[in-house]
Amino acid sequence: MAIASHIKEVMNSKDASVIRKMFEEGALLKKEFGEDKVYDFSIGNPDLEPPVQVGEAILSLATRQEKGSHGYMPNAGYLEARQAMGEKVGREQGVSVGGDLVVMTCGAAGALNCLFKAILSPDDEVIVPSPFFAEYGHYVKNYQGVLVPVPCNSDFSLDIEAIARALSSKTVAILINSPNNPSGKVYSQQEVSQLAQVLEDQGKKTGRYPYLVCDEPYRDIVYDNKLVAPVFPLYRHSVIVSSFAKNLSLPGERVGYIVVNPSCPDGQELVAACIFTNRILGFVNAPAFFQRVVARCWDAPVDYSSYERRRNQMMSVLDEAGIQYLRPEGAFYLFCQVPAKGSGGEAGDDKEFCQFLKNYRVLCAPGSGFGYKGWFRIAYCTSEATILNSREVLCQAVFDWKK
């Protein structure tokens, strides 16, 4: 049987799953040279253990013998889980959110796919500030939409004027991710307020108010007293999607949610559409067991200080190696500029540089995969030994690259 031509094309492209490819190559290198001789910064796999409350909830629920606990449920998810997520997001946004505005999903990726399936018609556009999470383009294209990247300012803050110019009659949504993957940037209250005003003006002018979709799995992982700005009080047509992959270190459990702004004029219709798409896309429901788990421990306290410590250690290594970067305000990534190559000082190619680093068993993700050429991403959610021991080889690699 033939593979669909458009899938084969993507699979064979140079930008297909660059992060996963690096991760898989890293596993092979570790087998060959030993884990302590490979410096794998390729994938954002949180390495903190889930808080103790998660384990307690798992044990409590696993020993209960309730009839029907493994059966079908409403496609929106269990009422207790929806109400808990409403309370969670309500606290974050400073508004009251009922469980009827929540859809439980298979992670944040499932949430975005359900949402885009619900709102996109062929050739509709979704604006995204770049750099952006590598899979966004696929999620939008899944439903015949068009991703429209708009470069951020030099400090990776939102370029509000550029976003305003990119708006068109085809714009259905703008998707923001704060803290941002890969840059670690946290968009300020002022930026989000200005963005909301631009979208409000667009709606008044065209009669079509674009959705402001906020992808927030890293919301709780912030540094230097930064706060992720709430959007519900600023713009009626806003939607939160998130998961517990990063904040509770549960990426493999695939439990997330969609929450629609209570002030959204078509909010109930949007929720109903997402419930429907959750079913017809084949997700059907978020995992039953972990819906109950997160309903009980979503507010468990977590100490993220080790991420901040490792951020500082990694910045020290980069400083010594002479690599320029943006100081992360959240998440667990460093977005770095490829050093100039050769005596002429010509700009370095990010794909070539990441391939070059592999010769030193250093694995990073090229910025081209995030819609931002000339940069590369380091995921520092790895051991402190990996970070500290990479100092010598990274310095040598950069020295050799510049020859």
Image: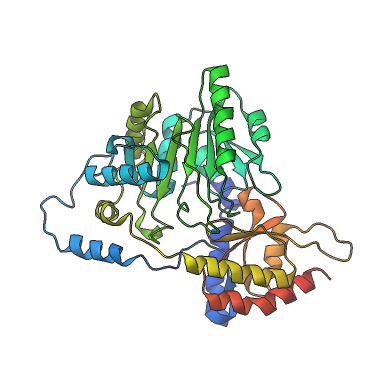
> Residue pushed farthest right?
344
User: Along the line of sight, which residue is nearer the eye, 349 or 189?
Assistant: 189
In this view, 195 is above or below 303: above
Task: Indicate how the structure is coloured in the image.
Answer: rainbow
User: Along the line of sight, which residue is nearer the eye, 325 or 143?
Assistant: 325
Query: What residue is at 74 percent from the left and 76 percent from the top?
Result: 396
Q: Quadrant of the C terminus?
A: bottom right
In this view, 32 is above or below 81: below
Q: Is 57 positioned to the left or the right of 161 in the image?
A: left
Q: Is 209 positioned to the left or the right of 150 in the image?
A: left
Query: What residue is at 45 percent from the left and 36 percent from the top?
Result: 116
Q: Where is residue 85 drawn, in percent x and y?
A: 32, 45
Query: What residue is at 75 percent from the left and 70 percent from the top?
Result: 398
In this view, 45 is above or below 397: above
Q: Where is residue 79 drawn, in percent x and y?
A: 23, 42
Q: Where is residue 226 drawn, in percent x and y?
A: 53, 53
* Residue 283 location, quadrant: top left
In this view, 124 is above or below 131: above
